[in-house]
């Protein structure tokens, strides 16, 4: 059996790297059955907080990684060093995406440690309605199916300059289960992620042991990424 298996949720697929990290055989995480498709605009809304850029002020700058991998700290930004008159402010629990090259999956949920960071107006933010759990949406943002929907809606003539507007993201339809179902999905997928992390740590230990003994060996635990360009 392959080390790669699929855990299905919200009519979306999340790659799972190691079969040891999966639920028991024959089980699958699914919230698509019985839940009608709904546009994201019904369960979240565009919500952008702008802050003026002051020359004498230092800001914490963030970026959004591809493939739903999260937010990244890009260091400090001095107001005098940018031509932006204002920046978007990130708030915990919001969805943030990058409009440019949206087919690469630059979308995620803002974690607590990035609350108050700023991004350019290339990164719109969205507040979730009461029907959505931020942790559930975080897993949805890691789904190739969502990225495909984003890709289908980008506009522009030059490939690397095509953008996805906020209104186009909100048109994407997904099956939205009740919060109690979302919570069960999150528990399973978080457990999978924790086990994968533990396996990676074990591989690092093995690699270090081999290196100390002068053995040139490659311990393979990481498969290709979630998104292939």
Image (cartoon, rainbow, N blue to C red):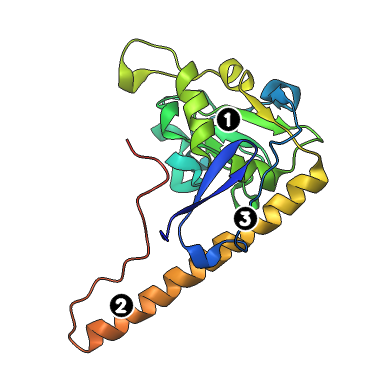
Please identify the quarter of the rendering in which residue 10 is found: top right
- Closest to the camera, between mark 1 and mark 2, is 2
> What distance separates the C-alpha of mark 1 from that of mark 2?
42 Å
Residue 6: give its label.
Answer: none
Query: Image height check: is 186 above or below 106?
Result: below
Q: Which residue is mark 1?
A: 88
- Residue 136 position, x and y percent, is 68, 45
Q: Which residue is mark 3?
A: 189
Q: Which residue is mark 2?
A: 207
> What distance separates the C-alpha of mark 3 from that of mark 2?
27 Å
Q: Residues within 10 Å of mark 2 (few under 14, many from 20)?
A: some
Say whether marks 1 and 3 touch (CB < 8 Å).
no
Residue placed at 75% from the left, 31% from the top?
A: 35
**Residue 204 vs residue 149, the one in the foreground:** 149
Q: Earlier in the sequence, mark 3 or mark 2?
A: 3
Secondary structure beneath dot 2 equals helix
């Amino acid at each position: 059996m392959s080390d790669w298996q699929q855990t299905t949720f919200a009519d979306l697929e999340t790659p799972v790297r190691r079969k040891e990290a999966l639920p028991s055989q024959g089980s699958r995480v699914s919230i698509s059955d019985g839940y009608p498709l709904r546009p994201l605009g019904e369960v979240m809304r565009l919500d952008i907080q702008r802050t003026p850029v002051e020359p004498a002020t230092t800001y914490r700058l963030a970026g959004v990684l591809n493939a739903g991998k999260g937010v990244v700290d890009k260091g400090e930004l001095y107001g005098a060093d940018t031509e932006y008159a204002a920046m978007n402010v990130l708030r915990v629990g919001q969805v943030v995406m990058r409009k440019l090259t949206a087919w690469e999956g630059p979308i995620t949920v803002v974690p607590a440690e990035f609350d108050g960071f700023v991004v350019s107006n290339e990164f719109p933010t969205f507040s979730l309605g009461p029907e959505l759990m931020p942790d559930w949406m975080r897993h949805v943002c890691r789904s190739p199916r969502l990225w495909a929907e984003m890709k289908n809606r980008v506009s522009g003539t030059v490939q690397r300059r095509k953008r996805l507007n906020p209104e186009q993201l909100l048109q994407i339809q997904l099956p939205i289960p009740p919060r109690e179902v979302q919570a069960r999905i999150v528990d399973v997928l978080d457990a999978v992620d924790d086990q994968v992390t533990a396996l990676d740590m074990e591989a690092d230990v093995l690699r270090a042991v081999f290196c100390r003994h002068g053995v040139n060996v490659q311990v393979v635990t990481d498969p290709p990424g979630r998104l292939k360009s």
